Image (cartoon, grey):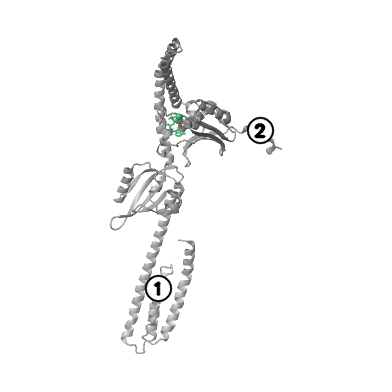
């Protein structure tokens, strides 16, 4: 109940009975003067009806009793004059009407109060639900007719953008059509559906919600609307993913140990033997080419094994202050030497910055990203590496190419181990790069801007800012 309403009713509580009293006195005086038999007394019904607006529950009964007394008094006062018996009969009838009116008014006031209390309780429930959950209501066609604030917050869409749409607007395309069909079949036959759904917000990030959909049924037993109550479980899902990921990594680790032992050593033997054989051949021996090919292949096999080992058992970073400019130039020079680097223009942009990171790992990570970009360009295009300071003490390194981009449906997979689209790719470059970034407390993400190409964004911690404080005597030293 709102405060204004309470104030209104409490002021009525004292004034209305007074008004009733005045009105009754007025009616009585008129009735007293009126010729015997006139039905002025019926006006007392109005006094009883005032009970509709006063919260004093006993009012209608008190008013009816008062009115009955006054009517009887009037009858008694007029007694003696020859009152026709038909008129005498009128009085008990009037009293009966007063009684019935009083009972009806009282009953109505009680019902109204109960309805108010129920509404208030419903409002409380709704407030509690809105505070606890992400809530949406849709009609039978699945069009959204209501969303609460939490829904707009998590989805990133405004209420105007959501109302009238169906839930496809936040569909992440993750669940197979059968899953969604089953959901609709369940609620359409009136049953509650519960499950975990991955949705996509307006800015493109994914969130997981534990979802309960309750159908509301009409008298005919057909649903007329659905209410969906959701809880954000993204953090739990991420934790689960990490655990599965780590379990997979542990298995890869064991496999890598076996590989290192059983494959790397024989491989080194083959290479050594081949080098011996090659040395025994004349410079112009036609078979040298084949031997050289064998050597190159074993070397790339060895590289892959090294990657696998690095991926399975990353060494902890040994961070130091590292100037990015020279590293980027060095990486450009290396890639320019590579066959993939021919016809590619390299450009470094942004502020000269230093990071607090492991020099070897950082160089390997950047080399990976720039080499990937060069391979995507296929002999024509530009690679731009931009450095910028970011809030939170981070440095952002963006590796941008003008290549074909990564199709949306595989964009999330490129960080998965062994995912490759290249004939001779190992698919470990990006997972290692991402892991290295995370081991440094940073991150590696990918985006394909609408204007084309691919942008990898690497975040690394900025060099520790001691030097500035030492040199900062002018900043406030006394
Ligand atoms: N700059 C890029 N442009 C287009 N596709 C890319 C780019 N970088 C990576 N990719 C895609 O990601 C996949 C995985 O890369 P990576 O993990 O380095 O493995 P690999 O290079 O061995 O294939 C590549 O096969 C390629 O499809
Ligand atoms: Mg690669």
Name of the residue lying farthest toward the bottom: 82
Sequence-wise, which precedes: disc 1 or disc 2?
Answer: 1
Q: Would you identify the image quadrant in which residue 313 lies?
A: top left
Residue 143 appears in the figure:
yes
Q: Residues within 10 Å of mark 1 (few under 14, many from 20)?
A: many
Residue drawn where x is 42% and y is 56% of the image = 123
The foreground one among 201 and 295 is 295
Q: CA distance from mark 1 to mark 2?
A: 86 Å
- Residue 439 appears in the picture as rendered: no
Residue at the outermost right position: 478
Provide the secondary structure element on which disc 1 rests: helix
Q: Quadrant of the C terminus?
A: top right
Q: Position of residue 259 (x, y in %)?
A: 40, 21
Say which residue label 2 marks: 470
Look at mark 1 in the image and give the residue it sits on. 49
Q: Quadrant of ligand 1?
A: top left
User: Dividing the picture into quarters, in which one does residue 327 lie?
Assistant: top right
Q: Report how many numbered discs are placed on residues in the image.
A: 2
């Amino acid at each position: 109940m709102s405060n204004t309403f309470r104030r209104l009713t409490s002021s009525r509580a004292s004034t209305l009975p007074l008004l009733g009293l005045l009105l009754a006195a007025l009616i009585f005086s008129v009735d007293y003067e009126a010729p015997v038999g006139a039905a002025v007394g019926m006006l007392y019904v109005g006094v009883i009806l005032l009970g509709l607006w006063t919260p004093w529950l006993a009012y209608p009964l008190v008013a009816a009793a008062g009115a009955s007394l006054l009517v009887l008094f009037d009858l008694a006062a007029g007694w003696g004059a020859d009152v026709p018996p038909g008129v005498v009969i009128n009085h008990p009838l009037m009293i009966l009407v007063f009684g019935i009116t009083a009972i009806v008014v009282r009953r109505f006031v009680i019902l109204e109060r109960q309805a108010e209390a129920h509404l208030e309780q419903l409002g409380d429930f709704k407030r509690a639900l809105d505070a606890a959950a992400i809530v949406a209501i849709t009609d039978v066609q699945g069009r959204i007719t209501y969303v609460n604030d939490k829904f707009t917050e998590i989805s990133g869409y405004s209420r105007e953008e959501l109302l009238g749409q169906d839930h496809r607007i936040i569909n992440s395309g993750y669940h197979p059509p059968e899953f969604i069909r089953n959901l609709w079949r369940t609620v359409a036959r009136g049953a509650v559906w519960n499950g975990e759904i991955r949705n996509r917000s307006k800015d493109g990030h994914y969130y997981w919600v534990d979802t309960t959909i309750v159908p509301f049924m009409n008298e005919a037993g057909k649903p007329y609307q659905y209410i969906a109550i959701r809880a954000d479980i993204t953090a739990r899902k991420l934790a689960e993913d990490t655990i599965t990921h780590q379990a997979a990594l542990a298995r890869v680790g064991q496999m890598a140990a076996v590989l290192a032992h059983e494959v790397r050593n024989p491989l080194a033997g083959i290479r050594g033997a081949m080098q011996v054989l090659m040395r025994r051949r004349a410079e112009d021996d036609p078979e040298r080419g084949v031997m050289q090919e064998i050597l190159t292949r074993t070397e790339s096999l060895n590289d892959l094994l090294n990657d696998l080992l690095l991926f399975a058992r990353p060494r902890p970073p040994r961070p130091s202050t590292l100037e990015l400019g020279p590293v980027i130039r060095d990486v450009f020079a290396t890639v320019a030497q590579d066959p993939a680097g021919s016809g590619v223009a390299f450009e470094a942009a942004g502020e000269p910055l230093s990071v607090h990171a492991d020099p070897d790992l950082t160089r390997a990570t950047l080399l990976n990203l720039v080499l990937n970009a060069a391979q995507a360009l296929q002999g024509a295009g530009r690679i731009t590496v931009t450095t910028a300071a970011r809030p939170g003490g981070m440095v952002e390194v963006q590796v941008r190419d003008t290549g074909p981009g990564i199709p949306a449906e595989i964009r999330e997979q490129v960080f998965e181990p062994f995912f490759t689209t290249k004939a001779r790719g190992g698919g470990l470059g990006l997972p290692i790069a991402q892991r290295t970034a995370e081991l440094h407390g940073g991150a590696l993400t990918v985006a394909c801007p609408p204007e084309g190409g691919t942008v990898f964004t690497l975040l690394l911690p900025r060099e520790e800012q001691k030097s500035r404080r030492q040199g900062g005597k002018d900043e406030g030293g006394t």
